[in-house]
Amino acid sequence: MKKYFIPVLMALAIISCKEGKEEKEVAVENEEISEVETLQKTYAEISVKKGGSWEGREYMNGEFENVDSLEVPKEHTDHSWYIRYEGPGWENKHVGYRIYLDWRNAIDIFGKKVDTLVLPYVGQDGFDSYHEEAAWGLDILKAGKSMGIGGYGRYMNDTVAHFRNVDKTKAAVENSENSSSVEISYHNWTTGNATIDLDAKLSIFPEGRYTKAELTPSKEIEGLTTGIVKHGPELIKKQSENGKWGYIATYGAQTLVNDTDKLGMALFYNTEQLDKQLEGTDDHLVIFKPTTQTITYYFLGAWEQEKGGITNKQDFISHIDKLLQDLNQNNTLK
C-alpha cells in the first residue's frame, strides 16, 4: 500500500497572521486530500509510531508511519500514543470510521464536511486533535463504555464483555479499486469460561455510508453481539418485507459537536442469524445465534453537516428504508 504523508505544518509555518493561516490551512489540506482522492475512492490505513520506545504502557517519541499489517504489541492499550487515532481507519467520500485496536474494541465515526479522503491527515498535528473541529470535520461520536456503532463483543451476565483478554491481535488493511477493508484476527479471546479465535472484516465502498461487517468465530459461542451506543434518541426498528433483514436505528442530537447537532445511526442484521434484540446498559444490542459460519451485518452513520448530507429524521428513515429494501431484494448491499 502506498504511504501518504505530506507535511502540512511546514506550509503553515510561513503564514504570519491568524486569518491568513486559517485560509492557507484549508487550501493546503484540501489540495493534499485531492491528491489522495485521485488515486482511489475508498481508503483504509493503519499508522503506527516508529523510532521511539516503549516506557511501560506508553510509546514515547517517534514518528507515525503507515503499515500494511500489524501485530499489536503486548504493551499497547488505550491512550498508549502508539497507533494514530488509536486504531485502523476506513472511509469513503461520505464518512470515516475507526476501531479502537485495544480492549475497548469500539467503532467511532469521523464526521466529514468534505467529500474527499481525509484519514492520512487526521491526528498528524497532535495525537487527539481530531476531537477539535477542523476544515475536514472531526470525531463526532462518544463511545464511552459502549461498542460505538457496529462494534462487537460478547453479551454475558447482563453486560458486554469487550476484548480485555486476548493472546494476540493482528490487523491488516487492503485498498482496491472498488473497496477498502480492515481485517482483524483475535487469537484466544477469553470471556467467562469460553476461549475462541475471532476474525473480523470491515469493508467500505465508493458509494453509500455503510460498512459491511463480517465476523467469523472459530467455535460456537453464545452472546456474540453488536449494537449502537445509547445517547438518548428513541430506538427505531423495522424488518424487510420478506422478513430476512431488519434494522435498529437512532436519529437525533447525539454527537460531540454540540447539544443540537444531529446524527443518524443504523445497523442492519440478517434475521436468520439473530438470537434476540435487547437493551443493554450502554448499547442497543443485536445478539447473534451461536455459529461458526460468517455473520454479516451492516452499519452506518449519517451526519447532518456532511456535504450534501441528510439533515432530518424523515429523510434519514427514508434512506435506511431504501437500504432495507435493497437487502430484501438482493440479500446484500455489496
Image (cartoon, grey):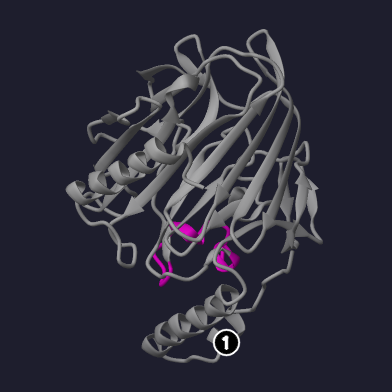
Residue 34: % across, % down: 53, 78
Task: Give the percent coordinates (x, y) of residue 106.
Answer: 52, 37
Q: Is residue 293 left or right of residue 253?
A: right
Circle 1: element type: helix
Question: Quadrant where the N terminus lies?
Answer: bottom right
Q: Is residue 125 visible?
A: no
Residue 133 magenta-highlighted: yes
Spot occupied by residue 54 in the image (x, y as percentages of width and height) = 79, 47
Residue 266 in the image, given as x and y percentages of width and height: 36, 39
> In the image shown, does 134 or 115 lie closer to the viewer?
115
Name the one closer to the observer, 311 or 159. Answer: 311
Q: Nearer the viewer, residue 173 or 7?
A: 173
Q: Is residue 194 above or below residue 99?
A: above
Residue positioned 65% across, 57% down in the render: 45
Q: Which residue is mark 1?
A: 11
Which span of residues is magenta-colored?
120-136
Residue 216, by quadrant, is: top right
